[in-house]
Amino acid sequence: MAPVASTAVPEGGPRYVAGASGAGDPYFPFAGNGGYDVQHYDLDITYTPPAPAPAPLSGQFEGVATIELRATQDLDRFNLDLRGMDVHRVTVNGRRATEVAPPPEGAEVEGQAYWHVQNDTRRQWELTIQPRPKVKAGRSVELVVEYGGATTRPQDIEGALYGWVTTRDGAMVANEPEGAMTWYPVSDHPTDKATYSFEITVPEGKVAVANGLPAREPTTVDGWTTWYWDAPDLQASYLSTASVGDYDLRVSETADGVPIIDAVDDNLTPNNLARTNAGLALQAEMIDFLGMFGPYPFNSSGSIVDDDSIGYALETQTRPVYSRVAGEGTVVHELAHQWFGNAVSPERWADIWLNEGWATYAEWTWTEDRGGDTAQEQFENVMSIPADDEFWATEIADPGPLGLFLGGVYDRGAATLYALKVKIGDDDFLAAAREWVSRYDSATASTADFQALVEEVSGEDLDEFFTVWTNTPEKPTSW
């Protein structure tokens, strides 16, 4: 949940403070916010995709975000993250706030107000809300933000596409690590999970797909169709989606009755469609296989497969997003994330190896189960990489903000888990994996938490093991 800054209460009553402008993550100092815990986002979106080429690749977006939050401090003001959008109107508990220019640091602002700072150089996109009356810790707030603007193709800190990525026929929406703020006001860090509901209105003929399950049948009025989705399971903001395109919706279910909703683009190439059909056909079997880590964590599963590309796939909760094709290996990887990354999310972005290492390890075990290379052979492939290769220079428990998606985070992460399995034994390893998902479900956890849990389950001191495998930027030789 959202971080709570400690503030002394002076004699004579509460001291109201400004909530922190970040969640305290050193990789992304202005992502997330302090002083409150979001309970629910209701996102009412109207989106017009770009006109056909050669028109500019830009859509038109209008949104109303109704945000239910609970103060965790006595708040004078608090922040949300919002990038590249214009704010039209803000109300706090039904009372309208006045827009003001961003004040100098430390300056007093009269009355209920809001202001918006957008500093691309500092990667600081902060919408500040000053409620009046001030908000005591424990009190609930209903915040309504009306906003919008022209959509673009935002980039993350490494220059990769993310967030609300405009496509010619709609939008691909994939937010990791802090791209949710490109399409709604949000506390954009995994430590503040919330539930979601969506109403997405698009031109008739387009399909809008979000997390969870349909809340009702879509409605069409005057050439516009509204799609309704409900996601009642807590989720991190980077796992939200509201993709728009020319999708064929397919519905099936697992043997245990988990609904699977696949949104497959009508315009995939024949080869990509064949590979996608083959990969998606295995989802129910994959979910059953991954049940070794515990019951499937959410109310539904599925996919969004777009004919456009953002250069990667992402494990958006209940409905991973795939670029152009959903091949078998990628599908099982993204499904494994529903346990590792989605149910249990990283406490800090430095802990991302606990997402990617587990998902890659799950790929290894699936491949072995299907008659391919064994997990041992895949581990040996990693260990055959020469010691002087830059692959081993990644300290996977602290890869840096530009190293979140390096190969070492994935493959060294998986090798770490395989080596751990060998060290503590199969039974304790599987017991630790299941306890990890159970104990930290709907929450976040760190590398230190993982080590402590495995030591608890196995009864072994694993300091040396984790130092060698996760905190030393060189090839492990003994552990």
Image: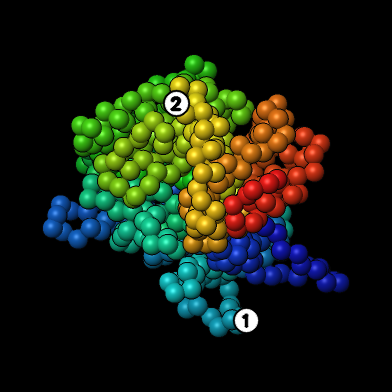
Q: Label 2's element?
A: loop
Q: How far is disc 2 from disc 1 in space, using C-alphas?
A: 62 Å
Question: Which amino acid, by three-letter code, is at mark 2?
Answer: Gly
Residue corresponding to mark 2: 372
Quadrant containing the C terminus is top right
Work out whether 296 lies above or below 461. Answer: above
Whether pointer 2 and pointer 1 mark residues with C-beta atoms closer than 8 Å, the reply is no
Residue corresponding to mark 1: 106
What residue is drawn where x is 81% and y is 36%? Answer: 459
Q: Earlier in the sequence, mark 2 or mark 1?
A: 1
Work out whether 395 lies above or below 43. Answer: below
**Residue 90 vs residue 15: left or right?**
left
* Quarter assignment of residue 86: bottom left
In-front residue for pair 257/157: 157
In-front residue for pair 383/99: 383
Q: Residue 172: x, y in percent? A: 34, 47
Question: Which amino acid, by three-letter code, is at mark 1?
Answer: Gly
Q: Residue 311: x, y in percent? A: 34, 50
Residue 263 visible, this angle: no
What residue is drawn where x is 53% and y is 80%? Answer: 103
In-front residue for pair 165/157: 157
For the view shown, which residue lies furthest in the top direction?
255
What residue is drawn where x is 77% and y is 34%? Answer: 457
